[in-house]
Image (cartoon, rainbow, N blue to C red):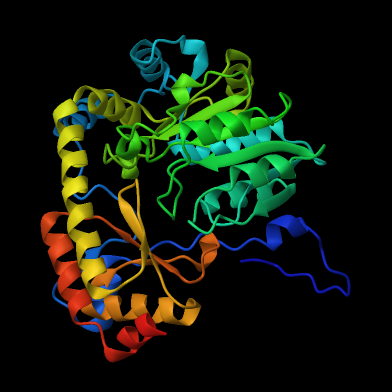
Amino acid sequence: MWCYIETNKPMPLVPPYISSLEPYRMARSVDEIRKLYGLKKVVKLASNENPIGASPLAVAAIANSLDHLNLYPTGGLRLREILAQQFGTKVQNVIAGNGSESILANIVRTFLADDDEVLTASGTFIGMRTVAQSRGVLYRTIPLTDKHAFDLPALAAAINERTKIVYLANPNNPTGTIFTRREFDEFYRHVPERVLIILDEAYFDYAHDNPNYPDSMHYRYDNVITLRTFSKAYGLAAVRIGYAFAHEDLIGNLLKVKLPFEPSALAEAAAIAALEDREFLHRTLELNARGMRFVTGALTDLGIDFVPSEGNFIMTLWPDEKAAENFAENLLKCGVIVRCLDSFGVPNGVRIGIGSVEDNEFLVSALDRLPESCKLALCS
């Protein structure tokens, strides 16, 4: 039983930059929506998850690791060695963690001091804002372009003496847009060496065949950190496993800060096996490409505005936040869970993931049944 002491003065146990934060709002679950609306079928297209699950090789690797649950993991050393070999670098240039978000949090803990700031776009992955503000440092944003992409010239011009980290997501979540090689090359020319560039490539696998995409592994600069994950194309979101590449001095300092036993042995085994399953990755990307064509075609036919995407999701655009919420709520009533993007900095946006063939067909049937209020919003 807690004992509360009444006092006239507040007890500042929690720093104001923590108390002002909002907890992450997860997508609503299939069971919740099924019960709420009395539905038989519900599909979740809100979290950019792999619709075909995980690689069978990864599942088998987890099963084969269950006899060793009594042993501490090795901090992802074997995975780091394999990634270093695969990408032609040294193990000292690679770090593994509990998802790329865990590594992102460790970057903030390692490299930011009280007077530093993080600079990024206003409509990007909310995890960066959370970890920066949880450190109590300034988090400054620049608006996206009119095409909903990172405005790299504006970001370069906004760098000042306090700027320590510039965060870039490519492809960007939630917009699905990318910046090109030429745009990144020009941007980099204006970034001081003292500024750390984070290139978050969580959706790298979906975009890397685009000839204009600047795969950051071709930019092995001393002040660039590449983040990648197994949560998306590899279907391992539940086990939390990600990795990063950077100069060995940066990785060496990150290793001082990260929890010594992350990632888990099960996650590491799954990731190593997933890397070997090229057929699964090919099926994932092929299914996504077909689904993207099908869903964007339907959106176009219905006159719903959207942003062309290089990821496994599409951001639809509405006249205002109320219209976006109305659209999302009506899809929920039809059994399709999508994501409103007010917390991402795009209040008039709704993100829709690309699902299986059946999921996408179910989505389009729901779009066809939109009520008149949504159709009127399209014309406003």
In the rendering, at what x and y percent does residue 313 appear? 32, 54
Residue 14 seen: no
Residue positioned most to the right: 8
Please tell me in which quadrant of the rendered image residue 246 appears. Answer: top right
- Relative to 333, is 349 above or below? above
For the point 25% across and 26% down, the residue is 65
Residue situated in front as seen by the camera: 346 or 272: 346
Q: Is residue 58 left or right of residue 97?
A: left
Name the spot of residue 121 as percent of width and height, x first: 60, 51
Number of numbered labels in the structure image = 0
Foreground pick, 114 / 359: 359
Residue at the spot x=53%, y=36% of the render?
Answer: 183
Q: In this view, does 91 lie above or below 268?
A: above
Q: From this viewpoint, is residue 239 visible?
A: yes
Name the side, left or right, on which 180 lies relative to 49. Answer: right
In percent of the image, x 61 and y 57: which residue is there?
Answer: 143
Looking at the image, the residue that sits furthest to the bottom is 372
Foreground of the two, 208 or 353: 208
Q: In which quarter of the image is residue 68?
A: top left
Q: At 21% from the left edge and 31% from the top edge, which residue is drawn? A: 58
**Left or right: where 209 falls relative to 7:** left
- Image quarter where the N terminus lies is bottom right
Question: Which is nearer the eye, 160 or 232?
Answer: 160
Which image quarter holds the C terminus? Answer: bottom left
Q: Position of residue 55 (x, y in %)?
A: 18, 35
Question: Would residue 161 appear left or right of 273 to someone viewing this image?
Answer: right
